[in-house]
Image (cartoon, coloured by chain):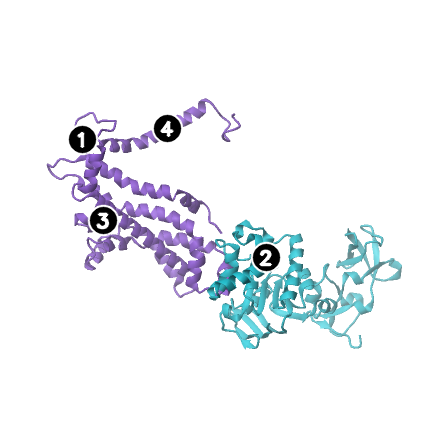
Amino acid sequence: MAQQDGMVEKRGGGLWLTHLGMIIGVAFIFFPIWLAFVASTVEQQAIVRPPMPLLPGDKLVENYTRALTSGVNAPVAMMLMNSVIMALGIAIGKIAISLLSAFAIVYFRFPGRHLFFWLIFLTLMLPVEVRIVPTYEVIANFGMLNSYSGLILPLIASATATFLFRQFFMTVPDELAEAARVDGAKPMRFFFDILLPMSRTNIAALFVILFIYGWNQYLWPLLITTDPSMNTIVMGIKQMFPSGDDTADWPVIMATSILAMIPPVLVVIGMQRLFVRGLVESEK
Amino acid sequence: MATVTLENLRKSYGKTEVIHGVDIDITDGEFIVIVGPSGCGKSTLLRMVAGLETVTSGDIQIDGRNVNSVEPMDRDIAMVFQNYALYPHMSVFDNMAYGLKIAKVPKDEIAKRVANAAEILQLEPYLKRKPRELSGGQRQRVAMGRAIVRKPAVFLFDEPLSNLDAKLRVQMRLEIKALQRDLGVTSLYVTHDQVEAMTLADRMIVMNSGVADQIGKPLDVYADPATEFVAGFIGSPPTNFLDAGQLGRRVEGGAKVGIRPEHIRIVPQTETDFAGKVVYSEPLGAETLVHLKLLDGEDVTVRQEGALPIPEEGESCGLSWEAKDEMIFSEDGSRVRQSGS
């Protein structure tokens, strides 16, 4: 039996101990999420009065319906929608732009090729927070405050993705491009027919990472959306906190938190297989 | 199908010239093998014909049309690459059909041509598979199939067999030869393997650092090499080169004498004044290769019948050959022809 499961030969006490350690670790991470879930299923009074409940209450449907349809400032359904549009826009836009720029840098000899590559690379050192004031100025002058384009465009260029695709394209044998040329494929045809299908696992991996990056944007949406109907869910949670003497509607806030967690989890689970393959292997 | 003419073809990378002017007229249906050591410019030459490298100066004509500045797809050529260059995400069928699809050939015509090529190459059971599910020999066939379906005027092969194991290489060599005969398509074939060159070629081009040292039928090249390089490169084991002064054979301008291993006989030392010490022997069954060191330190290889007695290591033997088998080369490696011989 010891032969059957696993390559570790040590059995018995050690095995239980390691499992115990893992279970405690998981419980430790999971506990706050559990608390949030419990809080989203009980009444306001149950949360405010100590001790906090540790088992779900009976107000689950009621609280979630309230959150989705009315929320505190804006209905959560609308904020979810805004977040989905922003995250998808950022993920898809970033992938499209970085694929094309990596294609240009790897497959075309044009003057300043290396200069442009290093310029793109340099922007890695300039995260959103560093350039946020000038970016705000630009977006405001373009009249893009409180709009999807304002949410998406400033975040759409990605040096990381460009760099990753460049590295991948450089591992694609030159002979493949030459064979396509002999077959009569023009550059864009080669890009769409051959390069793009070959990069699909890399694209999937990046999509997951970039979707979550987009979803978790906080500072930028907070800055440029003043209209509650343009709020994204991650910043929306903070907006729900009361100012002054208002009481916080904790069940609704907690329901919103739980709802905000669901889409990234779905994306990760849905693309798990492609995601892992894309990170581990490069299929040639 | 087509003739190919190269006229004083040159290629430079920056200031470094790598092809120093190659001329050849290839007739319709001819199988030309370009052979040479690595770095001699043979692949560059082929890639220039394919249109993957630009021409620095000179002319390439396919069927009388100058194609110097024509895109590869419009040159009416098909190329088989060393690593096959199959599209990894496409099935075998799609790999072969891709070029035709781009050329907007009607669907039923594509299906017909691919089916035909698959039949010739025995690929019918594999049409739906991806390249990674095929063996090396099958991938090689797909790469050939991709070339065949286009019905090109010229086939270009860039060391197509170098990734196969020895046995498969011999088999594919025969298949390529048979296929080229059947289709009658003018072909250029690059290899560093002289056996491939000897067996496949109608005519071969022996390249030496960017220069076509000799162009001719394989057996003519073997029997009558034009330069010291050709004599040394074609033939295995290679030609023995001896210092002309040592031999006491003074020919105008001659510096070295080349003798092929099979032309030297081992004789008792009393019969000749030319002797060497046996270093080691390699009995191969049908023949034996005897490696000797001459008194002045030069190495000589003798190829003799397997049935002949094999000399002991360390034994001193006399060496003898006939004067007609001597090939005399000048200091710069070119052949010195003796008048009247």
Disc nearest the viewer among 3 and 1 = 1
Instruction: Write down the chain letter for disc 3.
Output: A
Label 4: chain? A
- Amino acid type at circle 1 is Glu
Q: Residue B145: percent from the left, percent from the top?
A: 57, 60
Which residue corresponds to mark 3? A221
**Label 3 crowding class (10 Å Cα cut-off): few <14, some 14-19, many 20+?**
many
- Give the Cα separation between the discs numbered 4 and 2: 55 Å
Q: Nearer the viewer, mark 3 or mark 2?
A: 2
Cα–Cα span, label 3 and label 1: 31 Å
Q: Are marks 4 and 2 on the same chain?
A: no
Q: Which chain did the renderer colour purple?
A: A
Q: Quadrant of the C terminus of chain B?
A: bottom right
Q: Is residue A230 left or right of residue B306?
A: left
Left or right for B259, reference B269: left
Does residue B35 appear in this view? Answer: no
Tell me the subunit letter for badge 2: B
Give the label on residue B87, or none: none
- How far from the left and from the top, in percent, is residue B147? 56, 63
- Residue A269: quadrant of the picture: top left
Tag 3 and tag 1, C-beta contact below 8 Å: no
Q: Which chain is cyan?
A: B
Quadrant occupied by the N terminus of chain B:
bottom right
- The disc placed on residue A43 is 1
Q: Which residue is mark 4?
A: A23
- Residue at the disc numbered 2: B141
Q: In the rendered image of this protein, does residue A59 appear above or below residue B34? A: above
Q: Residue furthest left?
A: A245
- Closer to the chain start, of discs 4 and 1, is 4
Front one among A219 and B29: B29
Q: Say if mark 4 contacts mark 2, CB within 8 Å.
A: no
Q: Secondary structure at mark 4?
A: helix
